[in-house]
C-alpha cells in the first residue's frame, strides 16, 4: 500500500469520524418544533408510543378550565412548588438533590420541574442516560421560552402518566374515581398528586402508610 493510499484512507476515516460526531451533536442538541403546542394538543407523546403494557391506553384531552383547581394546586405543591417562578429549572432543588445524592452515594433524589417532566414525556424516553438529560435541558428551556406557564401546566396535566396505560387527568379521574377531572375535590386531587412519582405502584398499593401521610400533607395545604 502506497503512502498516498494510506493518506487517503486516513483522511476518509477522519472525515467519517467527524461526520459521526456532527450527527451525534446535532441529535443531542437539536430541539423539536413546539410552536404548534400553543394551539393543538399532542395526539400521542413519546411515553405513550413507548407504552407496551397489557391495558388499553387511555388518554382524553380536556382544557385547563375543565380541570379542578384543587388538582392544579395539588400537583404544583407536590411536584414543583416554584413552577410559576422558575424558567424551567429549580436550581436550588437541583443543588439540594445533588447534596442528598452525594451523601447516599447514589441517585436517590431527583429535582425535575413540571417543565422538565413535560419535555421528557412529550419527546424523550424513560431511559436514564446523560444524553437524554442534555436534550431534556434544552427542550425544557424552549418550552418555557415559547409557551406560557398556563399552557405548560395544561399540557402536563393532560399527558402525564397516572397508571398503567393511563395518561392525563381526565383518564386518571375516570379510572380512580369514575368521575371527571372538573369535579375533583381536595382529597381526590391530593391522592392523584401524591401518586405521581410512582403511579403504577400506588395504583396497586393505595393503603400504605407513606402514601396516606403524603396525601394528608398535600391536602392540608390546599
Image (cartoon, grey):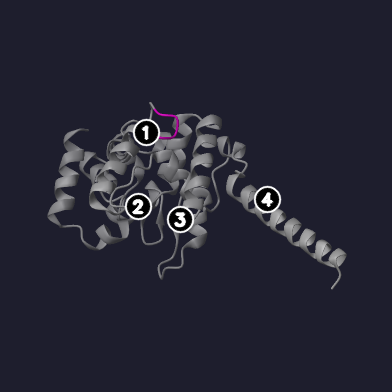
Residue 124 percent location from the top left of the image: 51, 52
Q: Are marks 2 and 3 in contact (CB under 8 Å)?
A: no
Q: Nearer the viewer, residue 13 or 91?
A: 13
User: Disc 3 and disc 1: Cα gap in Å?
Assistant: 20 Å
Please indicate, yes or no, whether residue 151 appears anywhere in the rendered image: yes
Count of marks, rendered view: 4
Of label 2 and label 3, which has the lower sequence position? Answer: 3
Res. 22 mark: 4
CA distance for labels 2 and 1:
30 Å
Side of 99 where 29 appears, left or right: right
Q: Earlier in the sequence, mark 1 or mark 4?
A: 4
- Quadrant location of the N terminus in the rendered image: bottom right
- Crowd around label 1: few <14 · some 14–19 · many ≥20 (10 Å): some
> Disc 4 vs disc 2: which is toward the camera?
4
Q: Nearer the viewer, residue 189 or 80?
A: 80
The numbered mark, 3 or 4, whose residue comes first in the sequence reads 4
The residue at 38%/28% (across/down) is 84
Q: Position of residue 100 (x, y in %)?
A: 25, 44
Where does residue 67 sit, x and y in percent of width and height? 37, 39
Q: Is residue 47 left or right of residue 208?
A: right
Check disc 1 and report the residue beneath it: 91
- In the rendered structure, are the residues bearing label 3 and label 1 in contact, judged by CB atoms less than 8 Å apart? no
| Of 83 and 169, the residue lying toward us | 83
Q: Which residue is mark 2?
A: 172
In this figure, which residue is indicated by the disc labeled 3? 129
Nearest to N terminus: mark 4 or mark 2: 4
Name the residue: 34% across, 38% down: 94
Q: Quadrant of residue 217?
A: top left
**In the rendered image of this protein, does residue 113 appear above or below residue 7?**
above
Residue that lies at the very extreme toward the front in this rendered image: 3
Amino acid at each position: 500500500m502506497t503512502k498516498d493510499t494510506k493518506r487517503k484512507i486516513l483522511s476518509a476515516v477522519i472525515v467519517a469520524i467527524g461526520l459521526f460526531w456532527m450527527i451525534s451533536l446535532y441529535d443531542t442538541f437539536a430541539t423539536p418544533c413546539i410552536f404548534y403546542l400553543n394551539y393543538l394538543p399532542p395526539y400521542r407523546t413519546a411515553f405513550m408510543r413507548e407504552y407496551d403494557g397489557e391495558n388499553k391506553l387511555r388518554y382524553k384531552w380536556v382544557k385547563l378550565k375543565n380541570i379542578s383547581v384543587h388538582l392544579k394546586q395539588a400537583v404544583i405543591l407536590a411536584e414543583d412548588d416554584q413552577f410559576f417562578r422558575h424558567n424551567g429549572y429549580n436550581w436550588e432543588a437541583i443543588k439540594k438533590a445533588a447534596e442528598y445524592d452525594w451523601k447516599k452515594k447514589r441517585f436517590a433524589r431527583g429535582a425535575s420541574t413540571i417543565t422538565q417532566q413535560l419535555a421528557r414525556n412529550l419527546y424523550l424516553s424513560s431511559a436514564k442516560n446523560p444524553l437524554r438529560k442534555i436534550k431534556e435541558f434544552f427542550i425544557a428551556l424552549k418550552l418555557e421560552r415559547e409557551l406560557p406557564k398556563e399552557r405548560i401546566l395544561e399540557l402536563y396535566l393532560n399527558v402525564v402518566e397516572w397508571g398503567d396505560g393511563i395518561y392525563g387527568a381526565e383518564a386518571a379521574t375516570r379510572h380512580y374515581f369514575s368521575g371527571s377531572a372538573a369535579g375533583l375535590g381536595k382529597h381526590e386531587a391530593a391522592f392523584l398528586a401524591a401518586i405521581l412519582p410512582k403511579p403504577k405502584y400506588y395504583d396497586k398499593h393505595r393503603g400504605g402508610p407513606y402514601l396516606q401521610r403524603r396525601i394528608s400533607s398535600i391536602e392540608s395545604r390546599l
